[in-house]
Amino acid sequence: MIPSSIVTIDCESVSVNIKHPIARYSADKVDLYEFQKMIQDSAVSRPFIIENAIDQWPALSSRSWANLEYLRVAVGHDRLVPVELGTKYTDCDWTQDLMPFGQFIDEIVYPSAEDTERPGYLAQHDLCSQAHRLCRDFWVPDYALVDTGRYASARNGESEVQTNIWFGPKGTVSPLHFDGSDNLFAQVAGCKYFRFYSPEESECIYAYPKESPDGGTIAGRSVRDKIYASAEKAVEDIPAESTVLFGGFGLCGIPERLIDAIADNKQINKLTAVSNNAGIDGIGLGKLLNTRQIKRMVSSYVGENKEFARQYLGGELELEFVPQGTLAEKIRAGGAGIPAFFTATGFGTTIQHGGTPIKYGSDGMAVIEAAPREVREFNGRNYLMEQSITGDFALIKAWKADEMGNLVFRESANNFNGPMATAARTTVAEVEEIVPVGALRPGEIHVPGIHVHRLVENRDCKKRIEKLTVRTAGESEAALAPAMQKRIRIIKRAAREFKDGMYANLGIGMPMLASNYIEPGITVHLQSENGILGLGPFPAEGHADADLINAGKETVTVLPGGSFFSSDASFAMVRGSRLDLTILGAMEVSQTGDLANWIIPTMLVMGLGGAMDVFSGENPGVEQCALPLTGVACVNRIITDKCVFDVVPGRGLLLRELATGVSVDEVRSATGCDFEVDPDVSETY
């Protein structure tokens, strides 16, 4: 659609001979009925231009988007936007970056393409969802609400129309690609030259394998065979009672459209779903729990999904708990053809001994229990044998894919998607963009296309943030509630455990807040088990990124020098003893250092998460807490709002420090076991 002011191609940046001009119609001659007829009639189903369709938009007049200074104010000078840098994807230096909108205008738009070493443009982006002032400048044409009869799944059955903005100087090029949904392109300022090809010409413009003498293909299937028109088609042959691996961590990197397609197909049921967790109530795998299409979950964490916990405790759902690092390694090993492996994680706990309820009966008693593990000793240390996991299908989410199925993940959305892509007979990848073969540099590919069998493009994916967490102005501690003041006391004392140069893992909740109190001059490299090294502070308001979260599903930033990796690589760091310090919360800690922090049977279900893995680097003991153990004899120091204990092997607890105003007698009355008192104990925090 174009305004009356742009009815001919006369821009300096376009110098082409148009061999086949596109049909043009005046908006006053194309009503909705005629529009629908034109796009559904295969005989005339070609691109066409509607003139005068957006003449009344304020974006062309009173609030002109051709005025860059107006846009700078309306969008916000410091608002982060995604920018494609480079002329085209096939350039060796092409990349995508986040930068403030004002910087984008000053460095990319104002200088001409000739004066800029690396031209760039604001890529497909729903800028209006962030800069709400822009929504006043245009309105969605009624044409966008017409049923086209194509791409039925494009909006997941919702009536919302996705609005994206492209913005940049002349000289930039979008590569050859296939759009997975219908588009209405409105040219507000400047011009854009389109080159269209019929789908029938794909063999002339894509790299196809040569035919062999027997009529097959020398290089295997055509790369285009991997691309499916809809999520429904990509999952329709999943049989009932299949084992399906679902990628993601929390809501980050989940294949939401593929999950929706399963939810709409009730023939796909009685599934064994392998996933780190199950999303939240009604979102992600929570949707399949609501529709009762999952028979058994194999997970490490329940956490915030109340329906997940309710079904498990009520005997409606089978649940096999697996420590998060063990789950990642089970999947990685399965993809590598390794049937089983040994790990120290879980020795001395119910993972070793078995008996953890997999399914409860109506009377609250376990009717299916986890089996015990085989134990072997290597170099004087005990290990459990774990069998690998493979799936009939793996449904994963990636940022980009080329037509051969090579995948690229964005930031912390690699997580479980990477290893799961390799561990199924059929891997279906939902991606935000499919690019031509050659558009991805070999060095940036995370998963080679050999592992990926089907691709579904979802340019309109909704990236939900489970726990939006931003930096806030400091609040006076005196104004905080008493309970929070106690927590701050614990957090501040815990922060004194950091030493310069440490690599540390902080558990969700209070432990994570300890990073806010690291002393000046001390550098600590924070690791998050979902695949981040170099965690920074929470983002400023308006700068949160759904693809960048920590293990607690909170939005975060990454410091210079930080890195992203998959969940199996993350726990390889843990099990390889690369971490210097771990701080976790606990429900119980015994006098010999046993830890319990993952479940209260028949009551509270949290899950093993990564805690069992981060504790497996210590020598285990045999003392049992009242609750199922996370780790045996694994705690070195206990920090409370009243005191600090050290766990001394062979002796038990030693009282080292007191909080201000707390006496030894007060500590004794609040502690459920005996302890020794250090002769030099004093108030230190």
Image (cartoon, helix red, strand yellow):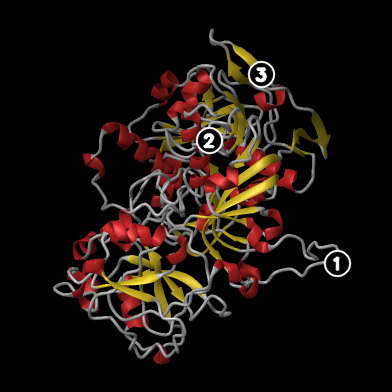
Residue that label 2 marks:
265
List x then y, in percent, for residue 168: 36, 78
Residue visible at 68% across and 36% down in the picture: 345
Of residues 97 and 57, the one nearer the viewer is 57
Task: State the image quarter where residue 435 is shown.
Answer: bottom right
Q: Is residue 302 left or right of residue 212?
A: left
Decide which of 218, 624 is in the foreground and name it.
218
Left or right: 132 in relation to 127: left
Would you call the spot at circle 2 few (<14 residues within 10 Å), some (14-19), or many (20 or more)?
A: some
Residue 401 falls in image quadrant: bottom right
The label on residue 213 is 1
Q: CA distance from mark 1 to mark 2?
A: 41 Å
Q: Are marks 1 and 2 in contact (CB under 8 Å)?
A: no
Residue at (24%, 67%) from the top-left corner? Answer: 29
Residue for badge 3: 369
Q: Nearer the viewer, mark 1 or mark 2?
A: 1
Q: Nearer the viewer, residue 68 or 146?
A: 146
Nearer-N-terminus badge (1/3): 1
- Spot occupied by residue 544 in the image (x, y as percentages of width and height): 37, 55
